[in-house]
Image (cartoon, rainbow, N blue to C red):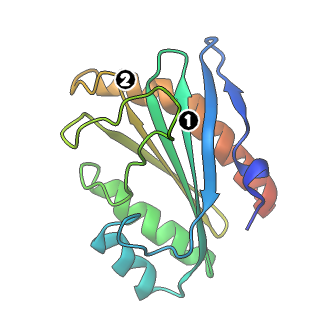
Amino acid sequence: MAPLDELFPAEVKGASGAAFTRLGSKALESCTEPDSVGPRLAALIEDGAGCVGEQIAFYKDDRNNQFNMAVFTMRDQRDSLRVATELAMAFDDYQVAVQAPPAGSGLPALPADSGLVQAFTGHGRVMVVALGQWSDGRTADFQRLTDGMAPLRDEVSRRVAAHEGTG
């Protein structure tokens, strides 16, 4: 797995001037922890060759919208494509847990019924999952939220591809 700082930059700037700031990142003990992934994703991972590890990061943008990045490094690159494809086909089945904002961030923990978008990319053995929520938890303008999350997703994906030698 790539080092956390290599995967998750401290700051990402989009072409539109949007800025994302990393508020925390860590490597998890397992790719199938019940607090981190849903049962469907855990089963998809276990049905393949398994996962080397999961790394997560929490970001906010300049409007305090919240973004979660999860990077799963699989043992077999065929599994990253298979799992990402399965998850993307069920776009409203959220199998990666939303992280609470880190203590001291000043950001509220959004309620469970807050609007949520997700996007997936895959590079070699690695699957990237990006999640985004509006700062006020609203359940509208999802395409705008997805588009606004794109610079962050793309930068993490670019870094993953460079580490995997696929970019």
Residue 77 at x, y = what percent? 62, 74
**Residue at which label 1 appears:** 59
Please indicate whether residue 23 sits to the left or right of residue 141 in the image: right
Q: Quadrant of residue 20?
A: top right
| Amino acid type of the residue that numbered disc 2 sits on in the rendered structure | Ser
Give the residue at x 18% y 39%: 113
Please indicate whether residue 8 sits to the left or right of residue 99 in the image: right
Residue 73 at x, y = what percent? 62, 69
| Amino acid type of the residue that numbered disc 1 sits on in the rendered structure | Tyr
Residue 19 at x, y = what percent? 63, 20
Answer with mark 1 or mark 2, whichever residue precedes in sequence: 1
Give the residue at x 37% y 55%: 97
Distance between the alpha carbons at the discs numbered 1 and 2: 12 Å
Give the residue at x 60% y 34%: 152
Residue closest to the far front = 104
Query: Is residue 55 visible to us here?
Result: yes
Category of crowding for the residue at label 2, using alpha-carbon neighbours closer than 10 angstroms: few (below 14), some (14–19), many (at least 20)? some
The answer to whether residue 86 is above or below residue 90 is below
The answer to whether residue 35 is above or below residue 48 is above
Query: Is residue 167 visible to us here?
Result: no
Locate the N terminus and report the quarter of the image it occupies. bottom right
The answer to whether residue 32 is above or below residue 109 is below
**Residue at which label 2 appears:** 135
